[in-house]
Amino acid sequence: MTVLFTHPSSLDHATPEGHPERAARIEAIFKALAPFDTLNRRDAPEVTDAALLRVHPQRHIDAITAASPASGLAQLDADTWMSPGSLRAARHAAGGAIAAVDEVLSNGGNAFVAMRPPGHHAEKTTPMGFCLFGNVAAAAKHALDMHGLARVAIVDFDVHHGNGTQDLLWDEERVLFISSHQMPLWPGTGDVDERGAHGNILNVPLPPESGGAQMREAYESKVFPALEAYRPDLLILSTGFDAHKDDPLANLNWATADFVWLTQALCDIAARHCAGRIVSILEGGYDLNALAEAVAAHVNVLIEKEKR
Ligand SMILES: [Zn+2]
């Protein structure tokens, strides 16, 4: 079974006119996924403070709560904004990631979490890059602490480095965090020598204009062998679609077929090691047509792999 987690609060997180991370992204995804009648659709609950506190100190939760504007927009950094609906949206986005872990570990199958704001740039005490809370890292910690898993692998194929996830899980020896990303590109981190406190981080930088073939070669030579050797109990995906050739923020030039290939390969690895248990959590993707097409293709693979 493939479960889709969403919440209407994702539409109430407003950003300034012209900002790439906008509510229309979720509208495009809802429209693209509407024809998928075998998807099991669930409302994402709000995250608990206890779940956030596994990755952020209380003062970060307090700071984000205090920054929430009563009206208008509050600017947290050059790229990161909050509107009156943002705190609730962020709490449901993190809650959806955690509920997806509960679903997949209780009932098997896989899940896609189509919510915003994204999370992989949020550091322990720093909201950053459109992100307020570390959704993926909180989901991984929940799987470890509440379900007793020994090894969780995260693959972040958003075009930007998952600096926040890396920061939140730097010294977590029960996680293997793998990020592929364009380099050089904002936020500038993600070099191969950033390995984590226990060698638990694998960064796979890709040069601008490198394309789908070079991505496949990097995954086959570096990422897949690392995952096979690690034998994860759960695979979490930080699923960004901004490596797409039509995306305005980067230049990795992947085609939708490359996202399909990558999703299929990751599903096959999950099938071998963790009964196909994958939690895929939306990060970036800013060209609405490319985003809709790639999300539909990604979710279609999740559904097809789960049928077998
Ligand atoms: Zn991104």
Image (cartoon, rainbow, N blue to C red):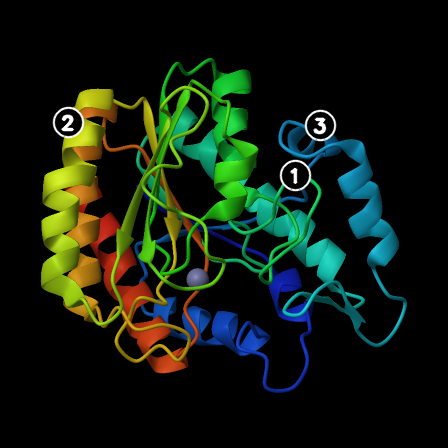
Alpha carbons under labels 2 and 1: distance apart: 33 Å
Asked if the residue under mark 3 is in contact with the one under mark 2, i.e. CB atoms within 8 Å, the reply is no
Tag 3: Cα neighbours inside 10 Å, few (<14), some, or many (≥20)? few
Residue for point 15% across, 48% down: 218
CA gap, disc 3 and disc 1: 15 Å
Say whether residue 68 is left or right of residue 31.
right
Picture residue at 37% right of the left edge, 25% below the top: 200
Considering the numbered disc 3 on the image, is that residue within a helix, a strand or a loop? helix
The N terminus lies in quadrant:
top left
Q: Is residue 107 above or below residue 16?
A: above
How would you rate the neighbour count of disc 2 (Cα within 10 Å): few for under 14, some for 14-19, many for 20 or more? few
> Is residue 290 in view from this perspective?
yes
Q: Disc 1 designates what residue?
A: 124
**First in residue order: circle 2 vs circle 1:** 1
> Label 1 crowding class (10 Å Cα cut-off): few <14, some 14-19, many 20+?
many
| Residue 157 screen position, x and y as percent | 32, 52
Amino acid type, label 1: Lys
What amino acid is labelled 3 in the image?
Answer: Ala
Q: Which comes before the other along the chain, label 2 or label 3? A: 3
